[in-house]
Amino acid sequence: MKVLLLSSIPKIGQKGELITVSDGYAKNALFPKKLAVAATPGMIHDWEEKKQKEAIQKEERKEIIKKIIPEIQKHIFAFTVKTGKTSEVFTSIHQEEIQNALAQFLMAQSKLLGNEDIHLELKPIKELGDHEIQIRIGREEHIQKTYTHIQINAEK
């Protein structure tokens, strides 16, 4: 019996997958726990269309990322922090702030890209000046590594 999974089930499949299972397993385990629904011909058709659209979007996203990486490398993301009289820094720039700035930049370039396409792993930056950071852009198997520049200035 073909079923559409409503939840991810270890060793069976991921949420949204269309799989074939035995009638007994579907009726006795999956349906009562609302883990899956029986796949109708219309549902199968919709699922196939959805998968095709997702594949097209993945390819579009991959091409957009290839085009946008040089722009990210050239762009300088500027942040301002409070400092004391002797330029000691009172706050730091956190990963989330940088990720939000990058997401705004990506969304301005393409509506297909967003916050979920940016992957950062860095500690808070608490020094004035220019910093080069490594970022990864993309999803799943289409992640591209690149560098961008962060500039931290003193608040005046």
Image: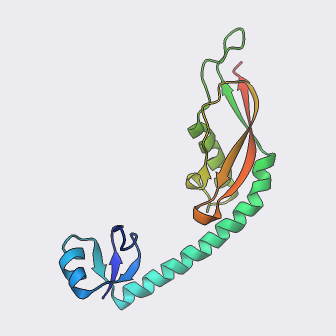
Q: Nearer the viewer, residue 46 or 121?
A: 121
Instruction: Depth check: give the residue in front, 35 or 81.
Output: 35
Determine which quarter of the picture holds residue 122. top right
Which residue lies at the image location 61% right of the left edge and 76% below the top edge?
Answer: 56
Q: Quadrant of the C terminus?
A: top right
- Residue drawn at (68%, 27%) of the image: 80
Judge whether 34 appears above or below 95 on screen: below
Q: Residue at x 75, y 55 (%)?
A: 69
In this picture, residue 3 sits left or right of residue 67? left
Q: Position of residue 155 (x, y in %)?
A: 69, 21
Q: Quadrant of residue 132?
A: top right
Q: Quadrant of the N terminus?
A: bottom left
Is 149 positioned to the left or the right of 1 in the image? right
Q: Residue furthest top?
A: 85
Residue at image point 24% right, 87% down? 23
In the rendered image, residue 61, in percent from the top left (x then y), is placed at: 65, 66
